[in-house]
């Protein structure tokens, strides 16, 4: 059993009795963690800690929980929407897992992908390959990367990837993603649960976006919503299959009736499997690794060996995983499933808020508060 699997068993409401002592320990730690997060947010709210401001509009996309809630497809959708309406967006990411020592890393200048997943992280590279004409940058300081994107790359809107907790940078629109099927995990703060900070911080959101929306699950409302901000619902729609090294694409019907080997390192592998099965594929072999997993040669050999043994005709993974595998030659045909975000409820709110201009666009200095 992996450490990750054990952790989720311990924090689950259905934990075994022998997990209770560990859960109580984690619960005690979470009390102090929650207090620190509350104090931090309060200091920024009261401007005890200053938030720096860029003269161009900043749109933040983030969540309150650990794990995947669809941030990357949402960022891609925002960038494409802004582009379609004549804007020049740039994506600013932390670059989780990237090893570049530079203060600001240009993953893409909007024309060419310049860095590898090892240097910049898998998700920034995936976005850079997906977004034509949109610069993607990584940096610890999103102010520094934003400054570079404006001054050097001509960006007029900045999209802050995984930015809900990045309070040092002022944002003009704060989009909070909530998994419709499990919006707040077990409701406890890390490490006793999946909340990154106290639930009351949802009040920082200007727009709540329900991801993995299913009309049969609840009524689409989110509690709490203290400011009564607009709530929209989204789903991920499969687009096609792509062979990343060559760019060759296949229609989704290519999966119909085919036996496939599935592998991925994402937050919701069960959803990925369900998507492939809904497209008519028969999953005969499955490997689910931890999120952001760095594949080793032996992992890939075992993935293929088991798939062949199970009678798989091809291998399928995610776009995020595929960017790390461009140099690997599988004997079986292999593809990445490309998906796009679709707003299924509240599209009018989505467009109105995305395309609205900041009230003080260009008026504030770089050290203005929130």
Image (spheres, grey):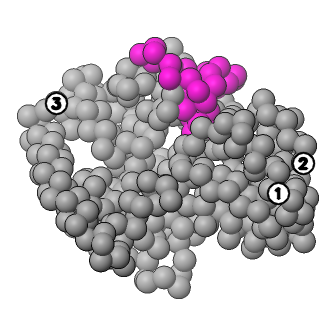
The reply to whether the magenta stretch includes residue 251 is: no
Above or below, comparing residue 273 to residue 58 in the picture? below
Question: On the picture, is 73 further left or further right than 146?
Answer: right
Please provide the residue range marked out in magenta: 99-126
Going from N to C along the chain, the mark reached first, 2 or 3, is 3
Name the foreground residue: 176 vs 187: 187
Q: Position of residue 189 (x, y in %)?
A: 25, 59
Measured as percent of width and height from the top left, residue 270 is found at 61, 67
Mark 3 and mark 1: Cα distance apart in space: 53 Å
- Of 133 and 194, the residue lying toward us: 194
Read off the residue under disc 2. 332
**Residue 342 visible in the snapshot:** no
- Give the quadrant of the C terminus: top left
Q: Which residue is mark 3?
A: 50
Query: Residue at (70%, 54%) from the top-left corner?
Result: 263
Contact? badges 1 and 2 (CB < 8 Å): yes
Answer yes or no: is residue 96 visible: yes
Q: Mark 1 sits on what residue?
A: 307
């Amino acid at each position: 059993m992996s450490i990750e699997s054990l952790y989720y068993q311990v924090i689950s409401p259905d934990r075994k009795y022998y997990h209770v002592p560990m859960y109580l320990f984690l619960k005690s730690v979470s009390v102090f963690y929650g207090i620190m997060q509350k104090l931090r947010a309060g200091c920024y709210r009261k401007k005890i800690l200053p938030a720096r401001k860029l003269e161009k509009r900043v749109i933040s996309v983030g969540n309150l929980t650990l794990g995947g809630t669809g941030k990357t497809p949402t960022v891609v959708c925002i960038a494409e929407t802004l582009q379609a309406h004549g804007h020049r967006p740039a994506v600013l990411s932390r670059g989780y897992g990237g090893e570049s020592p530079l203060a600001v890393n240009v993953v893409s200048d909007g024309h060419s992908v310049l860095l590898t997943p090892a240097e910049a992280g898998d998700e920034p590279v995936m976005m850079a390959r997906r977004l034509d004409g949109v610069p993607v940058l990584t940096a610890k300081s999103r102010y520094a990367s934003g400054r570079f994107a404006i001054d050097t790359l001509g960006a007029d809107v900045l999209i802050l990837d995984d930015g809900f907790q990045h309070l040092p940078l002022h944002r003009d629109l704060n989009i909070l993603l909530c998994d419709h099927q499990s919006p707040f995990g077990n409701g406890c703060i890390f490490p006793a649960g999946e909340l990154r900070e106290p639930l009351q911080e949802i009040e920082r959101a200007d727009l709540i976006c329900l991801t993995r929306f299913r009309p049969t699950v609840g009524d689409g409302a989110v509690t709490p919503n203290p400011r009564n901000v607009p709530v929209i619902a989204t789903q991920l729609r499969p687009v096609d299959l792509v062979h990343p090294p060559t760019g060759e694409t296949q229609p989704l019907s290519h999966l119909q009736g085919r036996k496939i080997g599935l592998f991925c390192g994402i937050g919701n592998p069960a959803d990925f499997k369900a998507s492939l099965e809904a497209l008519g594929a028969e999953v005969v072999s499955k490997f689910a690794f931890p999120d952001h997993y760095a594949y080793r040669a032996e992992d890939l050999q075992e993935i293929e060996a088991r798939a062949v043994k199970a009678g798989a005709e091809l291998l399928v993974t995610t776009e995020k995983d595929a960017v790390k595998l461009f140099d690997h030659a599988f004997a079986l045909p292999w593809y990445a499933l490309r998906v796009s975000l679709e707003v299924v409820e509240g599209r009018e709110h989505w467009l109105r808020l995305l395309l609205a201009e900041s009230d003080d666009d260009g008026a504030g200095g770089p050290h203005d508060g929130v």
